[in-house]
Image (cartoon, rainbow, N blue to C red):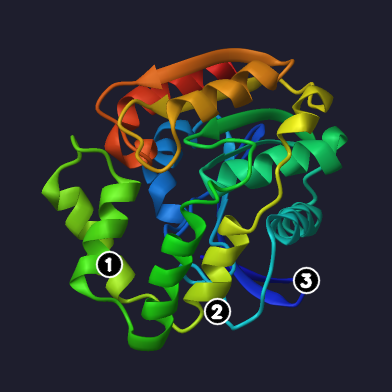
Amino acid sequence: MQRAVLNGWDIAFDDVGSGPVLFLIHGLLMDHTMFAPQVDTLRDRYRLITPDLRNHGDSESRAESHTQWDAVEDAIALCNKLDIESAIFGGVSQGGFQSLRLALKYPDRVAGLILIETQAGAEDPTLVPIYEGMSEVVAAEGWNDFILDSVAALLFGTSASDDLKNHWIERWRKMNAKHAMQTLQAVTRRDDVSSRLSEITAPALVIHGLEDAAISMDRAQATADGLKGLVQFVKLEHAGHSATVEQPDLVNEAIVRFLR
């Protein structure tokens, strides 16, 4: 991976392929490798930028609060460093939160949107204390099997294989847990941008798994309905909150069709 200091953070990223730029942003607790199936499929036709976000993967981790809007500035700073004027931005879950905000703040930089397992609203207030309570335990005591299994149940559908879930569980065990609160609060305390969706005119693809336990289908539908440039809303069977690795072939088909 390459590295760059962006807004004071040491950020790791991959930059592969050539052609029109696809900038893909991973979900909470994941990293750039959740787009490996998409990179493999598209790198012969597109240039793919896949960063690890703050406190994730190989990027710097520290106890500093940040927001989804801060992550937008990191993405723009990386594009500036790489001389990228515009890109198709996409992401899973919080990667989608950031892609929507990119389109709102920097519309001229966004050639299109690929929104996977995401929504425009704020976090469900009934779930915030549960999620933040779990992160407080992780920060203080490290991961335990109950929390790891609970996270896997949220981030993967019931059809996901044990091998896939165990692969990510082992990655989570190795994560720096000290900053779990700051990492989670960037998601749980995000603002609601659903009332601004009509400002976004970029062509958009929305993909959502029917087994997504973290974001309901009706929230994804509301986001899709609010986008003026919606091209297609793809609902995937046997996919949960991490469709790029749960159903990579179907995700790739939808993305290729959209890009064409």
x and y percent of residue 176 in the render?
42, 80
Tag on residue 240? none
Image quadrant assignment for residue 119? top right
Label 3: few (<14), some (14–19) or many (≥20) C-alpha neighbours in 10 Å? few
Q: Amino acid at mark 3?
A: Asn
Q: Amino acid at mark 2?
A: Ser
Is 49 rendered above or below residue 204?
A: below
Question: Residue at the spot x=29%, y=44% of the render?
Answer: 156
In the image: residue 40, left or right of residue 201? left
Residue under label 2: 61
x and y percent of residue 127 in the render?
46, 53
Residue under label 3: 7
x and y percent of residue 200 in the render?
79, 26
Q: Earlier in the sequence, mark 1 or mark 2?
A: 2
Label 1: few (<14), some (14–19) or many (≥20) C-alpha neighbours in 10 Å? some
Question: Residue at the spot x=38%, y=69% of the render?
Answer: 134
In the image: residue 65, left or right of residue 159? right
Q: Is residue 252 visible?
A: yes
Quadrant showing the C terminus: top right
Residue under label 1: 147
Q: Amino acid at mark 1?
A: Ile
Question: Residue at the spot x=21%, y=52% of the render?
Answer: 165
Is 45 rendered above or below residue 134?
A: above
In the image: residue 114, left or right of residue 127? right
Question: Residue at the spot x=59%, y=23% of the render?
Answer: 222
Query: For numbered disc 3, what is the local secondary structure?
Result: loop
Q: Earlier in the sequence, mark 1 or mark 3?
A: 3
